[in-house]
Amino acid sequence: MKKSTPILILLAMLALTPAVQAAGQHHKYNLDWPRAGEVLTYQSCGCADSCWTAELKQGKQLKARLRCDCEKLYFTKEGDQEQRVADSCDEFNVEGKMDLIPQRMRELKEK
């Protein structure tokens, strides 16, 4: 092995590090929400997008959270404990998922 080979390997690893880090990141996206002053965000956490969290906030205050842990659906409303609201998240594994999440958030929040 030449002396320069370890240096080239190190340089190649450093060059690929940002791409590897970016591939593992799950960005937050804003979803449509009708109330001014409140923001609904969506963030995937894995399981081929079957693990996700949707949070409704007003400023920094969490108003509600709807999440799937790859299997079950959970909901938390401001000041309440998290509750399992469905034994499956299959209803969200469809093309209109980003429309269904705000709809279900409204239904659960108004209960």
Image (spheres, grey):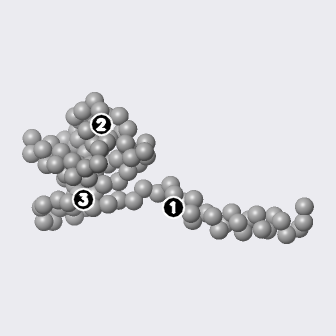
SS of the residue under disc 3: strand
Residue picked out by circle 1: 22
Q: Which residue is nearer to you in this view: 41 or 79?
A: 41
Q: Nearer the viewer, mark 2 or mark 1?
A: 2
Which residue does the image show at 36% across and 39% down from the upper left?
Answer: 69
Q: Is residue 19 left or right of residue 61?
A: right
From the viewer's perspective, is residue 6 above or below residue 87?
below
Would residue 30 be seen by someone viewing this image from the given angle?
A: yes
SS of the residue under disc 1: helix
Name the amino acid, label 1.
Answer: Ala
Which residue does the image show at 21% across and 52% down from the upper left?
Answer: 99
Badge 3 or badge 2: first in the primary sequence: 3
- How many residues crowd mark 3 within 10 Å: few (<14), some (14–19), many (20+)? some
Badge 2 or badge 1: first in the primary sequence: 1
Number of numbered tags placed on the structure image:
3
Q: From mark 1 to mark 3, how far is it between C-alphas?
A: 22 Å
- CB under 8 Å between discs 2 and 1: no
Counting from the top left corner in percent of width and height, residue 73 is at: 28, 37
Which quarter of the picture shows residue 86? top left
Q: Is residue 28 left or right of residue 24?
A: left
Counting from the top left corner in percent of width and height, residue 49 is at: 39, 46
Name the amino acid, label 3.
Answer: Leu
Residue picked out by circle 3: 31
Which quarter of the picture shows residue 8? bottom right
Badge 1 or badge 3: first in the primary sequence: 1
Q: From mark 3 to mark 2, how far is it between C-alphas?
A: 20 Å
- How many residues crowd mark 1 within 10 Å: few (<14), some (14–19), many (20+)? few
- CB under 8 Å between discs 3 and 2: no
Residue picked out by circle 2: 90
Identify the mark at residue 11; answer none if there is no mark.
none
Residue at the far front in the pictured view: 95
